Amino acid sequence: MRSVFFGTSDFAVPSLRVCASLTDCRLVVTQPDRPAGRGHKLQPTPVKRVALALGIPTLEPARMRDALEALRACEADVFALASYGKIVPQAVLDLPPLGALNVHPSLLPLYRGATPLQAQLRDGVTQGGVTIMLMDAGLDTGDIVLQRETAIGPDEIYGELHDRLATGGAAMLAEVLALAARGPLPREAQTARGVDPARIAATATRPLEKADLEIDWAWSARRIADHVRSLSPAPGARAELGGERVKLLRVSVRDGAATAAPGTLLDASGDAALVACGDGVVGVERLVPPNRGPLDGAAFARARAAV
């Protein structure tokens, strides 16, 4: 079975490896090299690095229409996509006779869009999963081929959930590719799931913006903890604490009430800094102060108290 793989970020790498091992992967489509690091040198995407190591040619079109002829020349039976980051037009999706498969880390039709993992953690979702769908021109609206649920731990951070679902999604892609090799794929319209359209719209996601990183200490302790874990370890939530602008990596809900104003650095407890919030206290367990490496919250609180 001949294939073309579309992907960009680390999330897509396990799926690329599956596609390369189970099919004749003739081309990898990824986003263009981008400047990174202090020197702003052009760096290939994680998918491009792995594709080159596997000996698979890559294509990085600025516009998808520029890739149409190269994609047609591959004569692929199937396309597979994971975390590509660009809209794929219908003219491209129509090329492979078996369709274009997408590995999406949510239980569609919920949490469509660019940042489903971060959004589910931010919202305190306890049951997530991965969907393999046959793509159409809509934003994550294609028919479901395979969907699998998984529990999301109350303290699980973005990096942990990302890696776990990247691996699980790749395993599901392997199952679907095996099915595709044997005949027509099973498919179910997302509308058949009977999910309230208002709920679908409310969970739709978009790319993160700078404002999305901000923490308001007047929020509830649970909301703060969930927001922090949805952005950890990168890009990291931001807040003012102890007179400094810090990046928050791990925050937990603590017992007790706080009479001080939200955002007040109260004390050190164990490995955490206790901070007043809207409905009580949170423990800042891990953070990154300005121009320093990560450290535990208690060490930060003691250092601020000594100033």
Image (cartoon, rainbow, N blue to C red):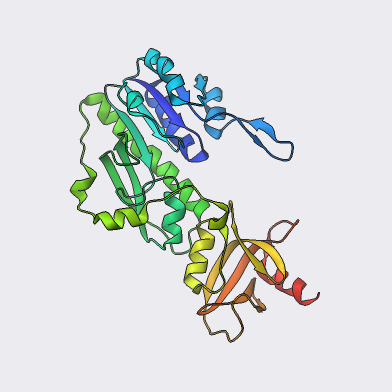
Name the residue furthest top: 73
Q: Considering only vertical position in the picture, is 289 above or below 74?
A: below
Q: Which residue: 44% across, 43% down?
A: 166
Say which quarter of the image contains residue 145: top left
Question: Is residue 64 at all visible to an observer of this figure?
Answer: yes
Name the residue nearer the viewer: 158 or 151. 158
Q: Considering only vertical position in the picture, is 37 above or below 297?
A: above
Q: Considering only vertical position in the picture, is 291 above or below 82?
A: below
| Left or right, 227 with reference to 264 | left
Residue 73 position within the rendered picture, expressed as x and y whole percent measured from the top left: 39, 12
Q: How many marks?
A: 0
Say which quarter of the image contains residue 294: bottom right
Q: Which residue: 29% across, 41% down?
A: 141
Name the residue furthest bottom: 259
Q: Considering only vertical position in the picture, is 189 above or below 49?
A: below
Name the residue nearer the viewer: 189 or 159. 189
Q: Which residue: 40% across, 28% down?
A: 19
| Left or right, 304 with reference to 87 | right
Residue 300 position within the rendered picture, expressed as x and y whole percent measured from the top left: 71, 69
Q: In the rendered view of the protein, which quadrant contains the C terminus? A: bottom right
Residue 50 position within the rendered picture, expressed as x and y whole percent measured from the top left: 54, 29
Question: Is residue 17 at all visible to an observer of this figure?
Answer: no
Q: In the rendered view of the protein, which quadrant contains the N terminus? A: top left
Residue 193 position within the rendered picture, expressed as x and y whole percent measured from the top left: 21, 50
Q: Which residue: 57% across, 63% down?
A: 250
